[in-house]
């Protein structure tokens, strides 16, 4: 892959420039120094060129302060121009991931280098570590990143966003985890099923208030009084009817006696 550093101690015999890979590492010998840099023999027909700005990460005033002829140095391939029979080298170890290599949704391996309240920084081989926000560490709520990871842990991360201008890399760990949606749905379904299969409890009758009890007693007494009055009237009508019947019978008997 382009972002991998290929290690090689020396060029293979007969190897030409077209076979050299970018970021490939060699151990070579400084054959000459100039004001602009140094020439390094890495086993090819043509020595490689190390520009003064590529001798070390810090600024360099004089090439001779860093290297001298006959010195063995470790170099990496920056660029190969076969048409010009030229190979450009650097003594600064290249990054495993350059900004142009980092893309959204890439999955990378990294090492947790620092924990903060708002998240963790993960070294992924780029110019600077990427940030995994606390909300991207795992599904569910956590109060502190230390609940999930600790410094030195190797983790898998997914690139959420790259801002090359601000030199920011946003990463996620939970994006590589299975979200617990199915489990929640199954739990809800089981609860619904269990509640539907349970027998319904009998509804309790509301306890009447003192006012309601008094009203009921008053209504009952009123009903009983009306019933008593109705019974008395009925008895009175029945008595009158009986008396009338007795009178009719008496008159009938008297008439029969007279006729005899």
Image (cartoon, rainbow, N blue to C red):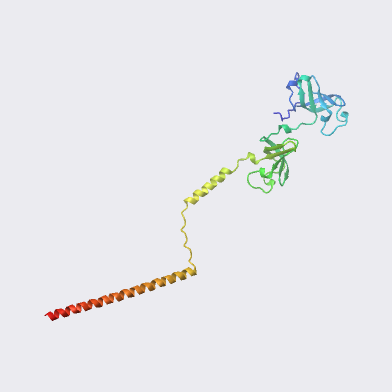
Quarter of the figure with residue 64: top right
- State left or right for residue 202 relative to residue 176: left
Residue drawn at x 52%, y 47% is 189
Q: Can residue 233 be seen in the rendering of this structure?
A: yes
x, y percentage for residue 1?
69, 28
Residue drawn at x 25%, y 76% is 242
- State left or right for residue 142 relative to residue 236: right
Vertical relation: 215 (above or below) 106: below
x, y percentage for residue 247?
22, 79
Quarter occupied by the C terminus = bottom left
| Front one among 39 and 11 | 39
Vertical relation: 120 (above or below) 91: below
| Front one among 73 and 1 | 1
Number of marks: 0
Q: Can residue 97 be seen in the rendering of this structure?
A: no
x, y percentage for residue 24?
75, 27
x, y percentage for residue 54?
81, 30
- State left or right for residue 188 relative to residue 40: left
Quarter of the figure with residue 72: top right
Q: Residue furthest left?
A: 260
Residue drawn at x 83%, y 30% is 53
């Amino acid at each position: 892959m382009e972002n991998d550093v290929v290690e090689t101690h020396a060029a293979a015999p007969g190897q030409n420039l077209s076979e050299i890979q970018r970021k490939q590492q060699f151990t070579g010998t400084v054959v000459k120094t100039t004001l602009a840099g140094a020439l390094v023999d890495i086993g090819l027909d043509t020595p490689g060129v190390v520009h003064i700005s590529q001798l070390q990460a810090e600024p360099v005033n004089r090439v001779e302060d860093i290297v001298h002829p006959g010195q063995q140095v470790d170099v990496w391939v920056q660029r190969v121009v076969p048409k010009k029979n030229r190979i450009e080298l650097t003594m600064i170890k290249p990054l495993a991931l350059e900004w142009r290599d980092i893309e959204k949704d890439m999955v990378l391996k990294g090492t947790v280098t620092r924990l903060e309240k708002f998240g963790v920084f993960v070294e992924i081989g780029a110019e600077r570590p990427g940030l995994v926000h606390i909300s991207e560490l795992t599904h569910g709520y956590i109060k502190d990143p230390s609940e999930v990871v600790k410094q030195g842990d190797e983790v898998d991360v997914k690139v959420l966003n790259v801002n090359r201008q601000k030199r920011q890399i946003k990463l996620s760990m939970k994006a590589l985890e299975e979200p617990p949606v199915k489990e929640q749905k199954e739990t809800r379904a089981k609860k619904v099923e269990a509640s539907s299969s349970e027998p319904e409890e009998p509804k309790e009758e509301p306890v009447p208030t003192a006012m309601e009890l008094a009203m009921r007693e008053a209504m009952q007494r009123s009903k009983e009084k009306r019933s008593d009055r109705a019974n008395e009237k009925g008895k009175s009508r029945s008595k009158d009817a009986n008396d009338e019947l007795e009178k009719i019978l008496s008159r009938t008997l008297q008439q029969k006696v007279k006729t005899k």
